[in-house]
Amino acid sequence: MAVDHETIFTMEATPVKFGRGASAEAGWELRRLGVRRAMLVTDPGVAAMGYPERIKTAIESEGIDVVLYDRTRVEPTADSFQDAVDYALEHEVDGFVSVGGGSSIDTAKAADLVCTHPAPVMDYVNPPVGRGRKPPAPLKPHLAVPTTSGTGSEATTVAVLDIPDLRVKTGISHRYLRPTQAIVDPDLTRSLPPEVTSSTGLDVVCHAAESFLSKPFDTRQRPDSPDDRPPYQGANPVADVWSAKALEFGGRYLRRAVADDQDLEARGFMMLAATMAGVGFGSAGVHIPHSCAYPIASVKHAYQPPGYPDDHPFVPHGHSVIVTSPAAFRFTYDAMPERHHTVAELLAGGPVRDPGPDTLPNLLRELMRDVRAPRGVAELGYGEDDIPDLVAGALKQERLLAVAPKPVTEHDIRHIIAASMTNW
Ligand SMILES: [Fe+2]
């Protein structure tokens, strides 16, 4: 029987305003979007750097009221999302501005969703953990102002949350969650600790590499209705453009950005790369390294990352992702060798000699070493005994594994995690 293949892909992107000083135009953007009373969502660490207060003043100078919410958790949960929702409802806001990393942007997405279309947070969470309910209509305006060069959350449809009881990370994903506008201002990454730049930058590299190496969109089965077309559609010609450029920038600028917190050229290009990779993976999707990253971040909380607030141990997202990437791309190599060579060349900034299955994994290991990433899963607090839990957690990420370029079995994931215990 002939399989009815997908013939359509969609491409959506957040409008982006980029450049040094751009965050001073936050009020102008909110006024353009018709916002009169905005909730500014940030976290205590970013608030301490003074940027949110400066942006709040810039917004107020346009005659817009701002209520400050600075209680974002670094790893949001359903409860922490609900706390932001309650705050938004209590203050009757008609728009959102997020200032911070992925946690703040994601918290604003969730607060916007639930205060616009009230329902329990878990109703909106992806199945099988939640009920996968879809919002019936667009949300209130959301202006996203990232302060790290990483998650690309300003460009995506996803809000990630931790479910501590189930020891699993999952998300809410729907196109209406994509922010209305982003302002990307390299001045806001000044004085970001090198560990944070390292983790967020390696996340960017993985977003772009996983997207570029995802299963081509036209090998999926055609959905019954447009409603059923997954947000992660698989590799397509437009996503490739964004992912490729992000890989090139990651290869060229990440080392410099980590080495010098005043190198605003390198930091600016990494911010741009983060947003571009966000556009790419928002369309194509991420798969094996991100599937493994979720349990690595949630099965144990034993790792106290240097350079981050020391109030609770956790694994920074980018580092949880990158540690399994060499083994993951060694595994996927035979599904699309040429595309693996292309990713290697983009990262290397030129032709690589005698490309083969280990070329890309080795380039990733070199990059990890140069930006002082953890050496592997073991350094993050895990031993051989933990492998079954990590494998089980990764296998729960069905939505992600579906876009891997070849079928992934339990045996394959176990092999990838075991091979990632230490990368050098
Ligand atoms: Fe990521």
Image (cartoon, helix red, strand yellow):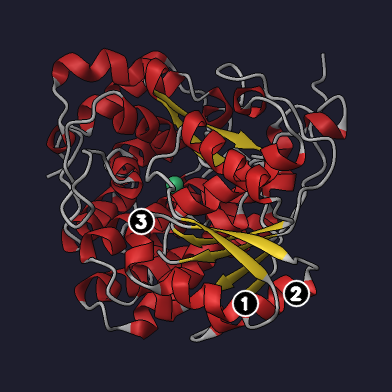
Look at the numbered disc 1 and say if its residue's Cβ is closer than 8 Å to ligand 1.
Answer: no
Percent x, y for residue 17? 63, 77
What amino acid is found at the position of numbered circle 1 in the picture? Glu
**Looking at the image, residue 343 lies above or below residue 317:** below
For mark 3, give the secondary structure: helix
Of all residues, the one furthest to the right in this rendering is 225
* Marks 1 and 2, how far apart at CA: 10 Å
Sort mark 3 into few (<14), some (14-19) or many (20+) by Cα contacts within 10 Å: some
* Marks 2 and 3, how far apart at CA: 26 Å
The residue to which callout 3 is attached is 44
Nearer mark to the viewer, of 1 and 2: 1
The quadrant in which the C terminus is found is top left
What amino acid is found at the position of numbered circle 3 in the picture? Pro
Q: Which mark is residue 60?
A: 1
Quarter-of-image position of residue 163: top left
The residue to which callout 2 is attached is 31
The quadrant in which the N terminus is found is top right
For mark 2, give the secondary structure: helix
Q: Earlier in the sequence, mark 2 or mark 3?
A: 2
